Image: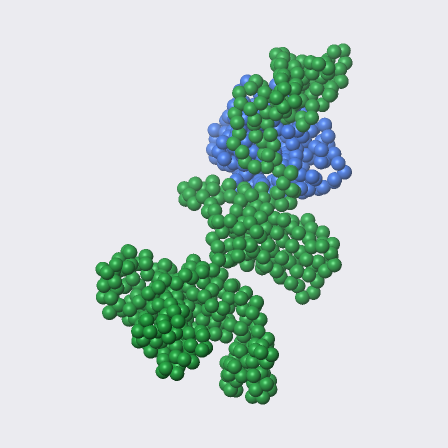
Chain colours: A blue, B green
Amino acid sequence: MSDTLDKLISSTPCLWKGGRSRQQASAALPTGYAQLDQVLPAGGWPLGVVIELLPESIGIGELRLLLPAIRVLTQSQRQVLMINTPYIPYAPALLHAGLDLNYLLMLMPRNWRDALWSAEKALLNPACGMVLVWSDNFLSNKTKLDDNKATRRLQVAAQVNQAILVLYRLSAGYCQNRQSPWAAVRLGLADNDGCLMIDVLKIRGLHKRFRVELDLNQR
Amino acid sequence: MNRANRQNLRVLSSHESTSSQLTAVTSNYPASAQQWAELWLCVYLFRLPLDVLIADTGQSAVVTEEKSGRSMVGTVSSSALESGIRTGMTLAAALSLNQTLNVYPRDLCAEQRGLESLAARLMVISSRVALYTDASIAIEIQGSLRFFGGVDGLLRRLKRALDEMGYAYTLSIAPTVRAAYWLSQSSGEHKVYHMDALVSALGALPVQLAVQNSKQLSRMQRSGIRCLADLMRLPREGMARRFGTATLKVLDQALGRVPELVNSYHPPGVFSEQREFYLPTHDLNLIRPAAEELLISFQNYLTQRQSATQRFKCKLIHLNAPATVIDVGCSHYASHADHMLMLLEEHLQRLELKADTTSVVITSKHIEGFVPGQLDMLNPVTTDSQSWCQLIEQFEARLGSECLKRLVACLDHRPEYAFSITNRCVEAATTGLPLRPLWLLETPQILSVVQGLPQWHGSLCLMRPFERIEQGWWDQQDICRDYCAAHNAAGSKLWLYQERRSRRWFLHGVFA
């Protein structure tokens, strides 16, 4: 679809746009990257949804992508919970990014079941703004929990207080048939010569697939 | 009391009669007089030995006491009174009057417990509650009158509490505690609000109340002194000589001429209550309601003391095994049963019972003064942060506190000392350092080197500038490293260092 056609459609208010009108009504959290805000249908990270991030490998900027949003949340005194982080989040770097560490909490549960339980509990809490879950080391185990069902529960929980659940999983270990239909946003992340290439695999309110290239260092 | 106040009181007492007028009268007191004035209410539990043992449902029952080897009738229930049984009879005589009589030996410990639990309960009426004798409780009510809307409202509240506990009682009100106690011993509800009215109110009471010594008592009765009015009519010097100063002192205390020291009741600083099961059980669904009941009782205890707790223990006592102790801690002060039950529930869910449980005990030694939450009407975040604190407690209860981590930045140039992980909220230090990675490895990972270049999922490309970080002689953690950023073919941006002494490469962070 061409840009002109998109512009024409959006300028006609009486036209029904499949699934898009609801999305526009709901609030969004600015991503902090103008380039990304423009292409996302809600004008930022949609609230009250599950966002699936599939980085190709670790260390390509998968957390930096979310830092501006986390900064806005912690500064407006919303709690952010990180569950099962692969390494220790480095406090000086987080402070440098402007985060208020008093509103950041890490949780290292022993198994996937506890991780899901705490994620759901946190999402249901009115003080919570965002929950980030790293699932790789748990899902590689033999614990075959029904992933679809879990994502659906988390999606419902996220809606209650308009919190965001971010689910990280490496795209290498990610098989297509385990794709959960309940995530509202699914983004593939890859590195492209120092820039972050965001492959929008799915986003609620848009039916096309597109790519955005983001330079995380120059905002 | 100075003369002006005394005159004022006298004027007021001349037109004081009913309790409904009292509130109006007291509010006209000069401030100094109101501070001085005390008003005591005494509750006399005349059937306490029986009431703590049985709930009086009309059965004939007596409590017996051992006196010089013989069982004597002590307290008598109302239906046993009708069959002619009186206090002081021998048990044999009582049984001959009524063969179906239920006989209970006196239990002094139960009486003390009953009295203390009543006193704890009456602390809602006033903070000055005293166990005056072993069957009476004195309450200072002057300070509570306005709150309860006068004596009538206060008495209504008091009687409701007494009726719920199922005690038979008489009560009276007087400006001194001893006068209130004496008045409560006689039948009828006496209310004396002013010092000046005391002499006439106490006059008709029998002299036995003031004199405990039986030899003196019989001497008084031989001299024709039968009521307190007779005693008060005697000249002080003569009375002190004939009957000793003790009687005089007691009388002076009752009339308010000499102050009397009253030991206030303080509820115990430790909470401990137990529920026993009829049969030992393995079922958590039976244990849970018992624990809930105990926690509600704990909540009442905390409410009465206006306090809260940070830590309590739930003990499950087994038949032939050591007790299971669940230690429940709260990061914030808890005083609500719902909240405490929710925390306990997380522990119970993970509990595996090894043996049958015979009883549940809730104890807490950590009772602390009431810590009110922020009562800011205009700041809605407060309730949110409270609920978040409760959630953190829930995480700690289920996952263990070691799973929960907070980050703090510290002022140190060495990367591994520039932060610390705690469980609590701490003020973070701000640092101004060059670019740092978002992930830090707990222990640096050694990297293999191929053709002079370190490897991590492929060959790494080093990026300038290098940053030299060294020193740390002050805590024997000396480091000597050259840090730099690097990326591999897949685009992963890493933070590496080369140890300058050994020339080995390590991975220390990831720019996520």
* Residue found at x 58% / y 52%: B364
Judging depth in this view, the residue of A213 and B367 nearest the camera is B367
Quarter of the rendering occupied by the C terminus of chain B: top right
Is B253 above or below relative to B81? above
* Residue found at x 47% / y 60%: B265
Quarter of the rendering occupied by the N terminus of chain B: bottom left
Instruction: State left or right for residue B504 relative to residue B13.
Output: right
Is A31 above or below relative to B139? above
Judging depth in this view, the residue of A90 and B269 nearest the camera is B269
Residue B49 lies, in percent from the top left, at: 53, 73
* Residue found at x 45% / y 43%: B374
Judging depth in this view, the residue of A29 and B485 nearest the camera is B485
* Residue found at x 68% / y 53%: B324
When asked about the image quadrant of residue B276, the answer is bottom right
When asked about the image quadrant of residue A124, the answer is top right
Q: Residue furthest bottom?
A: B96
Instruction: State left or right for residue B22 relative to residue A40.
Output: left
Q: Is residue A19 visible?
A: no
Q: Is residue B218 visible?
A: yes
Residue B251 lies, in percent from the top left, at: 36, 70
Residue B412 lies, in percent from the top left, at: 58, 23
